[in-house]
Image (cartoon, rainbow, N blue to C red):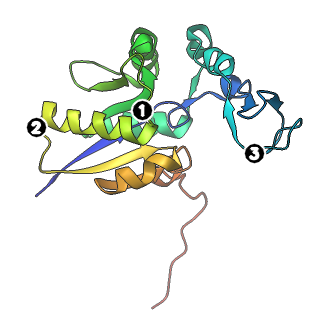
Amino acid sequence: FMKTVFIVDIDTTIAANSHRAAGLAHECLVCLSKVSGDSCDSCGSTDTKISQSSWDNFLNKDSMRKDVPVPKAQEVLTRMRALGMEFHFITGRNEGFRAITESWLGEHFGYDASREMLKMRPIGSNDSASTYKEYALKSLIVEQGLTDTAFVFFEDDPFVFRMYQSYGIVVKSPEGWEHWLPSPSSGVEPIHNR
């Protein structure tokens, strides 16, 4: 019998943050102009990145407090906790946001640091999401003694899916929450003649 542990991402997966994401703006890496579509309006390059000022606004603590829980995520994690299932959080947020993140998780998801781990990116880390999250997962495995464990990951980043798939099953979220706790049918269940 193999133990199963659930690993949960935060932003977009359980925290609806469209009010923050709406302000993310891309800039052209060639001419540094703002980009409004798939390519630069000035030079036509498709080589773009999210501007640092956009990231700074996205990662604003006051705005983070206004994130709302993804409804089905809240229901599923509450049910999982009631059933004694083990889950932990791995997020791309850095350690500078630990206090606001723990407070938000506690308020909306009953987070308790003595029961669940919250792995956060070190301040100054520039690793890709998949590189950082693999490091965090390996660290969690060692710290919690999870070597003979099956993992289920709730994640929204398609660049992280492949890495996590080498460790277990990935549930694309937030879409996947509905499948874990589907709405029951209403009406009378039909009787089948056999």
Task: State whether residue 151 is above or below residue 61.
Answer: below
- If you read the primary sequence from the N terminus, does the residue marked by circle 3 or circle 2 appear first? 3
Instruction: Assign a secondary structure to mark 2.
Output: loop
- If you read the primary sequence from the N terminus, does the residue marked by circle 1 or circle 2 appear first? 1
Disc nearest the viewer among 3 and 2: 3
Task: State whether residue 38 is above or below residue 135.
Answer: below
Q: CA distance from mark 1 to mark 2?
A: 25 Å
Q: Quadrant of the N terminus?
A: bottom left
Q: Quick one: 61 or 72, which is closer to the camera?
A: 61
Residue under the point 55% across and 10% down: 61
Residue under the point 29% across and 19% down: 112
Mark 2: amino acid? Gly
Q: On the image, which quarter does residue 96 sit in?
A: top left
Residue occupied by mark 2: 145
Mark 1: amino acid? Asp
Residue count near mark 1 (Cα–Cα under 10 Å), binned few <14, some 14–19, many ≥20: few
Task: State whether residue 162 is above or below residue 53.
Answer: below
Residue under the point 73% across and 31% down: 26
Cβ atoms at labels 1 and 3 below 8 Å apart: no
Q: CA distance from mark 3 to mark 2?
A: 45 Å
Disc sitting over residue 142 in the figure = none
Residue occupied by mark 3: 46
Residue occupied by mark 1: 127
